[in-house]
Every structure is written in structure tokens, then in C-alpha cells.
Amino acid sequence: MTLSAPGPARNLPQYGALIAVLLANWLLFPDFFAIRLQDGRLFGSLIDVLNRGAPVALLAVGMTMVIATRGVDLSVGAVMAISGAIAATMTGAGWSLPAVLAASLAAGLLCGLWNGVLVAVLRIQPIIATLILMVAGRGIAQLVTEGQIVTFTSPALAFIGSGSFLTVPMPVVLTIVLLAVTALLVRATALGLMIEAVGINRLSSAGAGVNTPVVLVAVYVWCGLCAAVAGLIVTADIRGADANNAGLWLELDAILAVVVGGTSLLGGRFGLVLSVVGALIIQSMNTGILLSGFKPEFNLIVKAGVLLVVLLLQSPTLTLFLPRPRGARPIGTVKPPVAPTSGGAKP
Amino acid sequence: MTASTAPPSAPLLAIRGLSKAFLGVQALDGVDFTLRHGEIHALLGENGAGKSTLIKTLTGVYQRDGGTVALEGREIAPRGVEEAQRLHIGTVYQEVNLLPNLSVAENLFLGRQPMRWGLVDRGAMRRRARAVLQPYGLSVDVTAPLGRFSVATQQIIAIARAVDMSAKVLILDEPTASLDAQEVAVLFKVMRTLRSRGIGIVFVTHFLDQVYEVCDSITVLRNGRLVGERRTADLPRLDLVAMMLGRELEAAAHRIDLGPAELDSRPPLASFKGFGKARSVEPFDLDIRPGEVVALAGLLGSGRTETVRLVFGMDRADKGEATVDGRPARLRGPRDAVRLGFGFCPEDRKKEGIVGELSVRENIILALQARQGWLKPIPRRRQEEIADRFIRLLDIRTPDAERPIQLLSGGNQQKALLARWLATEPRLLILDEPTRGIDVGAHAEIIRLIERLCADGMALLVVSSELEEIVAYSRRVVVLRDRRHVAELRGGEVSVERIVAAIASETPNPIASETPNIEVRQ
């Protein structure tokens, strides 16, 4: 049982791209790898990449499994806004931290359940089913915040966004913990196999006795939970909730991270770690472009270009030149449709 | 009479020596077909006989490789459906190919709307639509969207459109497949009316009763070749079935020892009473005992696959009850069936059987794992043991258990699917066409396996088109025709001749005995 897809050749494009982008950053900005300890917390550009990349990495973890079932969840950005809005509003109203966290995470689970029921029970196409919450979710978040940007001063909640644990920033810690828990959940049980089976052939899986509706609901619920944690981090970091802009367009970055990580939009084999690597590639580029002092206008184009290269490296024509990994499909089924639009210059 | 003009006695449609090949596979090989004015002509044959290729060549979807097609003595070669329509050849498919979201009138006049001052004249269109439908006894709201009406009504509207576009030849491709008895009767009335107006109708169907009810002539194809053309009145059913299946009726098959007769007194493992589903298969009774092979025989579309899908819960029965070990059993889905100890290898391996990109190992353990639940994963070592054991036992040809199953040949995929169910140690194994599309060697192995499993006390329910095969291993054969179970042969009665005779036998008019179930939705 491996956390990622088998075979070193398959992982090569992802790790190669990450290293290449990091080296490019280092060339442009020699202090890139410099890390210093200050007030018991690590600082530096590399740490910044991890810290800033945490929300998209979290989304990518949940999104990976949804995409592995041949679905997609467009609502994760809106779910981030809901969970952030609930956390900020409740904290402002004086609720204790455990209650705030429980309510925010429960909201994420509920959103996932809604999506899962639409997809698994009512059999609505995932892209449409989750579009409903993508649109409605921001409305719900605005209702929670009553249209205001809600700020708070609670240091306990802010700790999630800007605190650190054993010198590591909390967002990074939370991402690692959730990645580990998720990996354990799908790979130490038979859930991972069933997710892949349902994604490849739902009819055959159902015929073999796999409880396909439960598998589908489970992945959307988990995706909702991951989005809620990401929403908490963003809210805690800025000490406020902006229902309009929290998590805006991040669903596209998350989908891109998963695709760059080599999980096919056609479902099937998935690699959680590789999706996180995909998220880090995207974030390294964001950071690098900012550091390099390019005009912001270039950002999206440079990003799209680099991503195109990563996806080309996975194309079937090129995979022919690499040793064929066991059990891997030609990854060329990956489509690169979101690359140019995934924008949003996020530092 | 000059040689250059067609003699008045020329048939409506004369196809001579029609040939068509796809990538080296000869789909049609020198086929003749003759349609006369005012004739309903059945075009019959099993899967792969060449019926749809013939129709598609006729309607211009495919271009023929050789042969001639003459309409009223004039050579034609349509290069598309529209050109075929201009040549007075209209086609109505089982799945109506009109636009459900447009109104009835718009569908009738699509592409040829009555115009006034450059705009569609809706009033005229409605009036003409009513006039067109009137002879069919169809008084529907022509402004309502087509999709609101039953399939039968839609089909008659599609026929009306084709006839109104001055069709002389009307091709009906399995029009009755999703109709109930009442709707079929209405459709037949329409067909007879058109026949009396001199239109020639090509009728493709799998229902023999319907052929004998409405058709004047029959042409049978098999493996892309013409078997023969007969007048319906001159062709006994038995001969028709023999023509379709292509069997010499005197061929006697070798039978294996089918076990002691006291098997019949054993309590059944699974028993179905009045089990059925509307528009799928008529209610049937079926007992399956441990250690016996029950086969389902019948022509394509006779309800064999539908029966086994109900037994496994792939489709949910809406009538009757099932008992397993004498206790009432719930069969609301495959998961219920798996829990009861059933296994099912479906006919369409690719679509409903294998999980293509997963490895042979994962495919083999999938059902077992699903039954144990996701919380109790089978350890990797154990998975490998199971996979390797079945790869050896069934001689699955694969370099190793980690190869994606989609890279295996059809026969080896089938053996891996058998392994998937054998790993769950099922009590009833259901096989739908287990030997279709696999090579000769694997074919024989699978038949030997069926015999061995049965000897070990497993119950098997097998659907097969290979009658010799069925006769070789079955203790009982249930014969189906037109979606109903019409006969059961047991022990010494089982023979190819008896099966063919049962398929061909006539039953009292099924339309009269049917409870009317009229569905006129508006």
C-alpha cells in the first residue's frame, strides 16, 4: 500500500516540476531557501510557500478523491466562505473555540453531504450538482455575516492561521495531519480500492456488490470537511471573514493541483501526496512570480505556460519514452482545460 | 415494353448481391432482398446477422462495397439519410430519432416548415399536422412537446412524418421493443393501413409472434449471408427458428451424466414465484437446486438476460417474491444478492463486469472485499494468495496479478470474473453468455469449469445462445419466447430439437390474454 500512485516514473513529472520551479525561484531570488527561526516559528520563502499553499493543498486532498470517483466539486471555495463566516461570526458573538470549530466543521460536513446526496442518490452530474452550492454557498455565507466583513480579535482562533506548533506554522501542521489521516483512511482500509473501482466503472462496481452510493457520499463529505478546515485557516489568518472573497476561485486551483498531480479527470487511480505536490507547484510559481518582480500582468501567462509543460510531460506521446509503470493508465486522459483560467493572482 | 424503362412488375425495392465489410470483417456478403408494393416484410436474424448493416446501407449511413439496390427498377445509391428520404425511403428506429423538446407539429415539419413571408406559418403548420395525424386515429395536441407522449405515440408520429414525406419504403427497426401489447396492436393497425396504400414496410423485430401476426414475407440473414426468403404462410415456426439459428435439427449433442434423479426432491436453494417486471419479463416461476445447472434458452430479446438480471437484483422486480433456503429474500440490488451468496457474470463484460484499469488481483478480490465491507480490508498478502490461486486454478493467462485486467484477452477477462465470484464461495452462480466472444480453448475450459462447479454442489443459472452447449451441461432448460417463460425441459427431455421446438411453438394470442395497460400521456 503506497500513499501515492505506484512507480517512480509516473511521479517524475510532478517532483521534477516542483524541483525545477523551486530552483528557478532560487536563481531569481538567492535567499529563497534561507530559513530562520524567530519567536519560536520558522520564517523564509520556502516556509511561505508551504504556509500559503496550505489551503489549496487541503482542498486538493479532498478534491483528489472526488475526482477519483469521476466527479468534481466546484463548491469547495464557497464552503470555505461558509465555514469562515460561521467561525468569525460565532467568535465575535463570544462562543468558545471548541464550539466554533465544531460548528464550522459540521457546516463543511453538511455541505459535503448535500453534494453527495445530489450526486449519489439523485444522480445529478457532479459538475452541475456542486455548481448549485458553489453559487448558493456564497449567499449562505453572506447571510451568516449579514453582508459585512466580520472581524474578530480572539487569539485562540487566530492561532490556527498564524500560530505554530514545534516551530512549524499551524496551516502546514493541519495540512500534514489531514493528509495523513486521509491517507490512512483510504489506504489502510478498502475505501481507496472502492473509490477507484467506482470511478473507473460504477456499473461493474455496483454489480460486484460495492455500495456505490455510500462511497460517493463519503468522498463528497470528506471533501466538504477539507474545505471547512481550509476556510478556518484563511479566516484565522486574516482575523476576519469576507464572504465575497474567501476561497474565491480556489476550487479551480484545487482541480488543477489534482490534475497536475496526475489523477485523471476520468476517475480511477489517485495519488493524495501527488495532489499536494501539485498544489505546492502552483504556490511556488505564485510566490516566485511575485518575488521576481515581473509585472503582475505576466503572472497568469507564466503560470499557464509552466502548467502546460507539466501536463505535456504526462501526455501519452511522451509517456511512451518513459518506462511503463505497473498498473498505470496512460495519463494522457488528463485534460488541461483549467490552466489558463485558474488565475487569481494569489501571493 | 422497352428495355430501358422499368417494367411495371418491377418490385418496389430490389437488392442484389449487397456486400459491405468493416476492417476486413464481412458484415454483408452478397445479400439479396426484395420488397414488393403493399407488403410487410420481416427482416430477421440473430446478433451479427447483418440486419442493421443492411438497413444502414439502404438509408445511406454506410456506402456499399458491392451489389445493386434498385427502387422501382431504378438504381439508387443514397449517400446520406436525407438523400434516402428524397428517394422515398423512410426509417423509424426503436429509439425515436425526433426532438422531444419540440412540439408534435414542429417535429412533423422539421426542415420543411410551411413558410409565409419568410417566416414559419405556425397556423398552417398546426392545421397540416392535424390533417397528417388524422388517418392514424391519433388526436393529440400538436402544440405539445413530443416528449410528453408515450413511446408508442411518438413512434406513430415518426411514421406519419416519414409517410408524409412521401415514403414508399418504410423501415421499422425494432419498433415494438419497448411497447406493451396494447400499443403493439395500435402500431400494427397503422402498418396494415399503410400496406393497403401500397407502401412497402421492412419490419425488424425479435418477436416471432409479431412476425406471424403482421408480416407477409420473411427474409432471414445469418452471419452476413442470406439464408432465405419465404412467404410467412409457407414457413412453419420450427423451420424459421432453424433458419435463424442455423442448426441441422438432426444434430444430436453429447450429454454428460447429470446426477441422480433424486436431485429433484431436494429443497430448492432459491425459488421465485410470479417474479417479473413490467416491460422487461413476464412473471415466471423458477426453482434452482444445489448441484444443478439450469439453462435459459431462447432467441435474442426473448427475456433471458432480463430474467437473470432480476434474479441478481441488477434490475428490481416489481412483481412476485423470492425465497432463499425457504425464507423470503429481499433482492433490491446486487448487494442483497451478494449477501445471499449469489454471483453474476454479466453478458457485457466490459461495461458491467470488469473494472478495466484495476489489476487482475484487485478485480478478483473486489466482490469478496465488498461483501466484507470497507472497514475490513483483505491484507495484501492474502489478496495475492487468492489471486495467484485462481490464476493457477483457472489458468488465467497473465504475466502477473498486477496487470490491468483490460489488457487481458476476452476469455481471460471472463475467467478473472469467474474467479471474482468463486472467491466469494457463492451458492448460486449466474452466467450470462459465459462463452461469448472468447477463443475456442478458453471456451472448452469454461464449460469444463461449469461441470466441475456443479459437481461440487454449486447451483448454476446459465444463459447461452449455444444450444449444443446448453444441452451438454444442463439438467433443466427453461425456454423463453417474447419475454415469457414458455416451457421447461428436464433430464432426458433436454435436446437441441426439443429446445428449438419449444422456441418455435405457438401460444394462445398473447395480446388477448394481456391485461390492457394503455398509456396515453398527454
Image: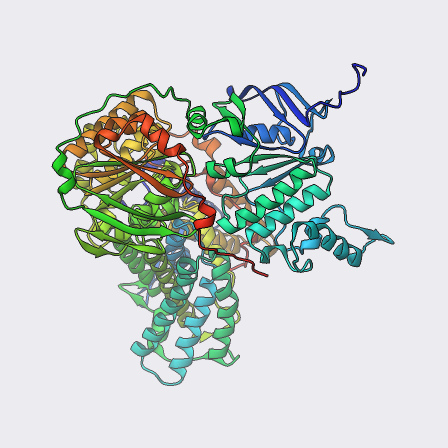
Q: Residue at x 22, y 47 (%)?
A: B270
Residue B158 image position (x, y, % from top left): 64, 46
Instruction: Using the rendered image of the protein, determine whether residue A347 is visible from the camera's viewpoint.
Output: no
Q: Residue furthest top?
A: B3
Q: In this image, A283 relative to B270: left or right?
A: right
Vertical position of residue A222 compared to residue B313: above or below: below
Vertical position of residue B400 compared to residue B197: above or below: above
Q: Residue at x 47, y 47 (%)?
A: B511
Instruction: Using the rendered image of the protein, determine whether residue A285 is visible from the camera's viewpoint.
Output: yes
- The answer to which of A260 and A197 lies nearer the viewer is A197
In this picture the colour scheme is rainbow
Q: In this image, B147 relative to A229: left or right?
A: right
Q: How many marks?
A: 0
Q: In this image, B217 relative to A59: left or right?
A: right
Residue B255 image position (x, y, % from top left): 22, 24
Residue A77 image position (x, y, % from top left): 47, 64
- The answer to which of A5 and B420 lies nearer the viewer is B420
Q: Quadrant of residue B353?
A: top left
Q: Residue at x 35, y 42 (%)?
A: B485
Residue A181 image position (x, y, % from top left): 27, 58
